[in-house]
Image (spheres, rainbow, N blue to C red):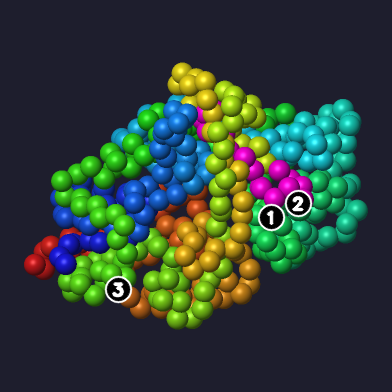
Amino acid sequence: MYTHLLVVGAGFFGAVIAERVAAELDLPVTVIDRRPHIGGNCWSAVDEETGVECHMYGSHIFHTSDGEVWKYLRRFTEFNAYRHHVWTQHAGHVYAMPINLHTINSYYRRNFSPEEARAFIREEAAAEGIVTPSNLEEKAVSLIGRPLYTAFIRGYTIKQWEKDPTELDPAIITRLPVRYNYDNRYFSDALEGIPLDGYGAVFRRMLDHPRISVRLETDFADLRETLSEDTLVCYTGAIDQFFDYSLGRLEWRTVDFAVERPPCADFQGTSVMNYADAEIPWTRIHEFRHYHPERPCTGRTVIFREFSRFAGPEDAPYYPVATPRNAALLEEYRRLAAALPDVVFGGRLGTYRYLDMDDTIAEALACYASVIRPRLIGTVRRR
């Protein structure tokens, strides 16, 4: 098999690399993916029964403060004006999430001002005496105190990671802000929205180039022995799988979705509702009709109940699990990867890191400029 570049995985990292090589260098690129569609976990498609566009692997809201990433992606789509707001249910009541002044006042049944709330939470956190947090639980308690942690973080975390929070890296909780005002936007980035025509259309446009060949339902393991010697591989699959798990398996979380089509036009009044209590088996419910308020209401709705669990050998990996054991194993795999000059690892799975979509695109653009482009130009000149 001859191609200048083989891209393994048709998610954002792989699609950006393929698009840049084809559009800027005019070189042939083959993109393969094990799934029957492009787009990876960002894929969206219209549900035929309800007419609602669904994010088939859970909600994906594009948000960034990187103007160059926004400018790049707008070559392939316009965005609507959607702003993400999340709510969470605890003990039969609904609260704003992330935790903000409304959450604090509602939970404690108080009417704190911003400074009063800040002082109150500072006292709640100080009561635990945690100076140097060593795990997720200690980090969360040191930020918001034991009561808020127990109500909104602990049960959800146990369901999400299937580990006690004392076993998890404290850095995980830093993704969730605490606000002492009534701002309940989930993200604070300057730029945010949903692609007007959906994510499926974005990926079709990115890969619509005569120099790009896309092969779906194709496994890298079936092709690697047929590659020519000067083929550069951009690998965005799981790094441990690339090495046939020779050092052991990294832990991944995956999710299952229970799809329902309730007999109503609006099931929960918002796009995402979290369920903080451990006794409720699902972590959240997605209702996708709310992502496109600019579209006419179809009169029907579809919801996805999300359940989190450890990924088995045949499951799609979603989230890396931040534990000391996995961090040590990842370093061993990185050493193996560094010895392969013809393979570039990228994306969430290839680097075993949690990456937002904008981070993935930014890293792909940087990888193209600093690694892929120089390498391919050198290959062409040698030939």
Q: Amino acid at mark 2?
A: Ala
Q: Are marks 2 and 1 in contact (CB under 8 Å)?
A: yes
Q: Which of label 3 and label 1 is nearer to you?
A: 1
**Quarter of the image containing the C terminus?**
bottom left
The spot of residue 111 in percent (x, y) is 87, 28
Q: Which of disc 1 and disc 2 is earlier in sequence?
A: 1
Marks 3 and 1 close (CB-CB < 8 Å) = no
Q: Which of the pair 247/139 is nearer the observer?
A: 247
Circle 1 Cα neighbour tier, 10 Å, few/some/many (<14 / 14–19 / ≥20): many
38 horizontally vs 111: left or right: left
The x and y percentages for residue 365 are 34, 51
Q: Out of 5 and 296, give the one closest to the viewer.
A: 296
Q: Secondary structure at mark 1?
A: helix
- Local packing at callout 2 (Cα closer than 10 Å; few below 14, some 14-19, many 20+) is some
User: Which disc is residue 159 wearing?
Assistant: 1
Between disc 3 and disc 2, whose residue precedes? 2
In the image, taking residue 131 as reference, residue 271 lies left or right, namely left
Whichever of callouts 3 and 1 sits on the residue coming sooner in the sequence is 1
Label 3 secondary element: loop
